[in-house]
């Protein structure tokens, strides 16, 4: 490759808005910033389905905390398995595994039908256990369906899943499920402050600020919420700083 071609290769990603092209190794500081940003971005998506599930099942605070802990721990283990592919197990790709909103409705239906509470959770866990073997079995023959499940079909399904999450995003912007001040300007103003802050830093010419746009926006929103009296630590006063197992 000539020097001219080398310059074009390095300039093209910047022209497209890409900070680091494929197979690049960013500096440690920027790598940590990007990792922290992804962690904070996926955190809410992982724990929200458990919180949504706990309300119709009428679970107490201890059981709800247990579900949240389970979701985070299993997400970490499953993500590690996916990234560090061993034989036929794992994809070998950086694919974060977390809870899914797609199964919320059937799980709530099964839990309520079983009597809510711990009995409802037992029904949900049992169905999930049996259903997991069906998914594992289908994964072994899924490649045979490529002629039917074309990229157009799978892409449409993924797009529909993403569109279904818009409702969850707008609900959180308005105050979250069951909020007494749902849709108030206080909640919407804070949400738009986070969005605008993220967009401003995302357009920065400094790579560190662009990569950390989400982290910075979340911190700005959190600090603002604290001074607005929207952050309550009272429920955390009786909890240990660190717990290996949090049993209900």
Image: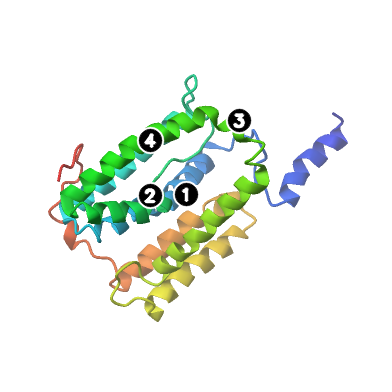
Relative depth, front residue between 246 and 27: 246
Structural crowding at the residue carrying mark 2, measured as other residues with C-alpha within 10 Å and reported as few (<14), some (14–19) or many (≥20) = some
Relative depth, front residue between 51 and 212: 51
Tag 3, which secondary structure? helix
Q: Earlier in the sequence, mark 1 or mark 4?
A: 1
Q: Earlier in the sequence, mark 2 or mark 4?
A: 2
Structural crowding at the residue carrying mark 3, measured as other residues with C-alpha within 10 Å and reported as few (<14), some (14–19) or many (≥20) = few
Q: Quadrant of the N terminus?
A: top right
Q: What is the number of callouts on the image? A: 4
CB contact under 8 Å: marks 3 and 2: no
Residue wearing tag 1: 37
Q: Nearer the viewer, mark 1 or mark 3?
A: 3
Q: Which mark is residue 46?
A: 2
Q: CA distance from mark 2 to mark 1?
A: 15 Å
Q: CA distance from mark 2 to mark 4?
A: 19 Å
Q: CA distance from mark 3 to mark 2?
A: 31 Å
Q: Residue at x 60, y 30 (%)?
A: 144
* Farthest-out residue, bottom: 185
Q: Residue at x 28, y 48 (%)?
A: 68
* Farthest-out residue, left: 238
Q: Which mark is residue 18?
A: none
Structural crowding at the residue carrying mark 4, measured as other residues with C-alpha within 10 Å and reported as few (<14), some (14–19) or many (≥20) = few
Question: In this orientation, does residue 96 appear?
Answer: yes
């Amino acid at each position: 490759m000539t020097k001219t071609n080398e310059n074009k290769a390095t300039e093209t990603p910047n022209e497209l808005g890409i900070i680091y092209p494929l197979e690049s190794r960013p500096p440690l500081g920027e790598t940590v910033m990007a990792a922290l940003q992804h962690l904070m971005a996926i955190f809410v998506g992982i724990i929200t389905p458990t919180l949504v599930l706990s309300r119709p099942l009428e679970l107490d605070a201890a059981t709800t905390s247990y579900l949240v802990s389970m979701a985070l721990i299993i997400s970490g283990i499953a993500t590690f398995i996916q990234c560090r592919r061993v034989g036929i197990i794992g994809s070998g790709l950086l694919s974060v595994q977390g809870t899914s909103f797609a199964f919320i409705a059937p799980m709530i239906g099964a839990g309520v039908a079983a009597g809510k509470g711990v009995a409802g959770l037992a029904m949900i866990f049992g169905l999930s256990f049996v259903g997991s073997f069906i998914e594992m079995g289908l994964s072994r023959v899924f490649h045979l369906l490529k002629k039917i499940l074309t990229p157009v079909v799978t892409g449409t399904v993924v797009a529909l899943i993403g569109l279904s999450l818009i409702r969850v995003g707008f609900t959180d912007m308005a105050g979250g499920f069951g909020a007494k001040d749902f849709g108030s300007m206080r909640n919407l103003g804070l949400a738009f402050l986070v969005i605008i802050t993220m967009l401003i830093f995302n357009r920065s010419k400094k790579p560190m600020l662009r990569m950390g746009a989400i982290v910075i926006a979340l911190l700005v929103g959190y600090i603002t919420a604290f001074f607005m009296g929207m952050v309550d630590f009272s429920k955390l006063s009786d909890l240990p700083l660190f717990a290996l197992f949090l049993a209900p």
